Image (cartoon, rainbow, N blue to C red):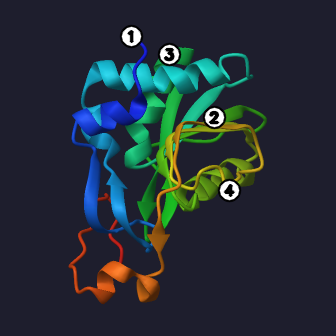
Amino acid sequence: MRAKNLLDIFTETNALLNGHFLLTSGRHSNQYFQCAKVLQHPEHNEYICSKIADYFAEYEVDFVIAPAIGGIVVGQEVARQLGKQSIFAEREDKALVLRRGFQIEAGKKYLICEDVVTTGGSVFEVIEIVKNSGGVVAGVGFIVDRSNNKVQFGCPQFSTLQLEVVSYQPNDCPLCKQNIPFVKPGSRKVNP
């Protein structure tokens, strides 16, 4: 695929949504990046994830790990391009855990992959899983950085698209004050 503006890809695939959204972080926003709409196209998935794989190609990485559900497709494709195994953490009783026989190998280096970062909550949880099991965090790669590089993970990190997308605490949300109903398009259940 020829070089293309990533924001154009999101727009063309109807993956950049405008409205009133409840984010996984609990914050509200007038924009939402539905990465699944982009990643369902193999050519876009390969192209976007190649940016992450290329960035970390010279890093020592033994495994790729992702938080479910949004990061799984990203992690799998980045792992494929790096020639590494991919595992994922999933929610159980509101916390990310390893299931399905997945394990962290002590001393091995793990690249964490995610689709969208707003506050970094899921990535921070995976960092703790890796570290608490004796693994080493090699870096964090993700598609959309909604914080415009404000969220720092304390290791090498790379995002393919950095934007400052406005988000609000629910009690400060101007869309709520206008009585515009919100939608929750993400995978995780969040109490408003």
> What type is the residue that disc 3 sits on?
Gln
> What type is the residue that disc 2 sits on?
Leu
Q: Quadrant of residue 106?
A: top right
Q: Position of residue 53 (x, y in %)?
A: 56, 22
Q: Quadrant of residue 176?
A: bottom left
Q: Quarter holding the C terminus?
A: bottom left
Depth check, mark 4 against mark 2: the one in front is: 2
CA gap between label 4 and label 1 equals 37 Å
Q: Earlier in the sequence, mark 4 or mark 1?
A: 1
Q: How many residues crowd mark 4 within 10 Å: few (<14), some (14–19), many (20+)?
A: some
Circle 4 is placed at which residue position? Answer: 128
Mark 4 in CB contact with mark 3 (< 8 angstroms): no
From this viewpoint, is residue 105 visible?
no
Mark 4 in CB contact with mark 2 (< 8 angstroms): no
Circle 2 is placed at which residue position? Answer: 111
CA gap between label 2 and label 3 equals 13 Å
Q: How many residues crowd mark 3 within 10 Å: few (<14), some (14–19), many (20+)?
A: some
> What type is the residue that disc 1 sits on?
Arg
Depth check, mark 1 against mark 2: the one in front is: 1
Q: Which is more toward the observer, 34 or 166?
A: 166
Q: Position of residue 5 (x, y in %)?
A: 41, 27
CA gap between label 1 and label 3 equals 18 Å
- In the image, residue 115 above or below residue 119: above
Q: Earlier in the sequence, mark 2 or mark 3?
A: 3
Q: Earlier in the sequence, mark 4 or mark 2?
A: 2
Q: Which is more toward the observer, 102 or 192?
A: 192
Circle 1 is placed at which residue position? Answer: 2
What residue sits 27% from the left and 43% below the top? Answer: 15
From this viewpoint, is residue 82 visible?
yes
Depth check, mark 1 against mark 3: the one in front is: 1
CA gap between label 1 and label 2 equals 26 Å
CA gap between label 4 and label 3 equals 25 Å
